[in-house]
Amino acid sequence: MHQTVAGESHAVHVPLAENLLVDIALTRKSVEARSMLVWGEHCTECVMPSCYASCALYTPRQDLKCRRFDQGIVPVRSSSSGEVLGMRVSFRKWGKLEAEGRLSAVSLQRSHALTIADRMVGTAIGWLPSVRRLPHLLATTWNRLKTRFAASGLSPREFQVFLIECICESTRGGSLTLTVKPRVSTGRYFQRHFEVISGYNRIEIPANTILGSVNIETDLVVQIEPVDVLPDNSFIFTFADFALLKGTNQSSARPDPAATADLNGRPMDSARKSAATCKCVVWDLDNTLWAGTLIEDGVENLRLNQTAVQVIKDLDQRGILHSIASKNNAEEALGALEHFGIREYFLVPQISGGPKSAAIGEIARRLNIGKDSLLFIDDQPFERAEVESVHANVRVLSHASIAGLLELPEFDVPITEEGRRRRVMYIKEEQREHVFRETGADFIAFLKSCRLEITISELNASNIDRVYELAQRTNQLNYAGRKASRQEIEALIAEGGNARMGYALGCSDKFGDYGIIGFAIVDQRHFNVDDFFMSCRVQHKKVDHAFFGWLLQKARARGIERVTVSFRSTGRNEPARQVLNEMNFEELENANSYISPTLDELPHWDIVAVQLGPRRLLH
């Protein structure tokens, strides 16, 4: 439900594919009670009304408040049934959706009645003549009343999830942020970044993760805003509320809950996204990792936060990395970490007097991971706000959240042998870079000296856990731009390689073993690579060149000179496109795919040695 604005109640009719309408209907049937948030358009830099006179972006709407969405919030109806489906939003710079008030669980019957009443009142206000601003006053009064009506239900502790269902009308998808915070600031709030793909999306954020940061039984402010405002962004929100789900909900009503569709009804995967996996936690030191201030108290008077240490060790076993962003003397701070026996857990620590946003950026660069894979923990509201102001896609938490860190969905990853060794692998990668810098060799000569080797193995029960982990973690070198579900990967084993084969790629060099670093799904009838993703740990090491060289040899033996690769741009996987260009692949028009050169034209495919793993790979 959205705020009523006088003169702006006209709905638009949108044609949607039948399966999208089915998805929307299933979501509504799955909900037993909801919070009935009343959404309005707001500005991230709002200091109304003084900004109306000073801000160059101020665009008045009919009630003279600032217009931060193109066309405002537009009700959307189905072209086929005429039913109101939700609200269309196209964000301008600094625009955000915002709702505030006290939450309660409103029953399905009551929410339906309130929706009908809202529609009738909104239509009536829209017909009133604009005399002495009467329609605007009535709209303001009605918005207050429906917010109050929505707060007169059951306890919000009943909620299981914050459910966002939306249709992204942009072909490029987008990144959004959900923020939940008390209306009266306490310094604690919940924030989660999530991606949406073109077409249908359903995102469920467990309510207990929000409860760990804010008290949802007080007056709250809930916000949804884009990480980056794209020129053609457009979203139809069909559901954006806290929700109590029925015993039989959508996840059990459909055989594949990850299935989705684009705007034309074509099937797609990974629409029901939860929080993106966190790959690295960045820690503050003073009054976060330890109690006390190093420069004032000295190391002997500091008390180590044992809860934080245990969290660090547990996450390390899951393959989550750790680093440090601290305003301290680097030598003394590293010495304190050595004193407490935990120095080994922290990669590329950034300790200086500079801004922590700069430290965060350097950590992401040195580890070669996206900033949206970082989570920053600090006890100071100023430092957290400074990082957020520069890196909107970095998740930020207070030190008060440390005890509940292990329960966050960002860290819900399978424990694998590669995960346990991930920190050591990064340390060895630093050694590789050090050797390269010291030798002064050209990069190709250096790669040859490293004796790189990949092992290509058929997907099986022994490597499926690692393959699934890669599927959920890989973004930059994810060619198809999606996250394969566990069920899909398991189905490949059941198929037995008759038409499609799953290949797991392991890698090693003279410095050590990288573990399983990549996976490909190959249609063996036409030699199309339906899916290919690879860890950033081996980026630029010509491992991908070696795999495609092997595949081209395999295709040539069957009389096929070229292979094709499915590719869908997500904005985050541009490094994958760059690799395709480096390998002289050509983009096919309107096909979301690339075609390879012949083996003779593929550069550097023979730098990395290829070994075949067990089972049927020699056939």
Image (tube, rainbow, N blue to C red):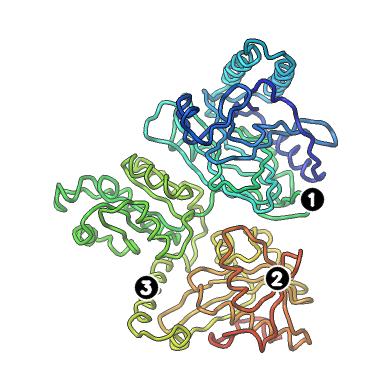
Q: Quadrant of residue 83?
A: top right
**Amino acid type for the residue under numbered disc 2:** Glu
Residue 610 position (above or below residue 274): below
Question: Residue at the right extreme?
Answer: 80
The residue carrying pointer 2 sits among few (fewer than 14), some (14 to 19) or many (20 or more) residues within 10 Å by Cα, namely some
Q: Is residue 361 above or below residue 41?
A: below
Report the side of 29 relative to 54 (left or right): right
Residue 22 image-quadrant placement = top right
Residue 473 in the figure: left or right of residue 8: left
Q: Nearer the viewer, mark 3 or mark 2?
A: 2
Q: Residues within 10 Å of mark 1 (few under 14, many from 20)?
A: some
Query: Which callout, 3 or 2, points at the residue further toward the start of the chain?
Result: 3
Query: In this figure, which residue is indicated by the disc labeled 1?
Result: 265
Q: Nearer the viewer, residue 489 or 590?
A: 590
Residue behind mark 2: 587
| Nearer the camera: disc 2 or disc 1 | 2
Residue 430, numbered label: 3
Q: Earlier in the sequence, mark 1 or mark 3?
A: 1
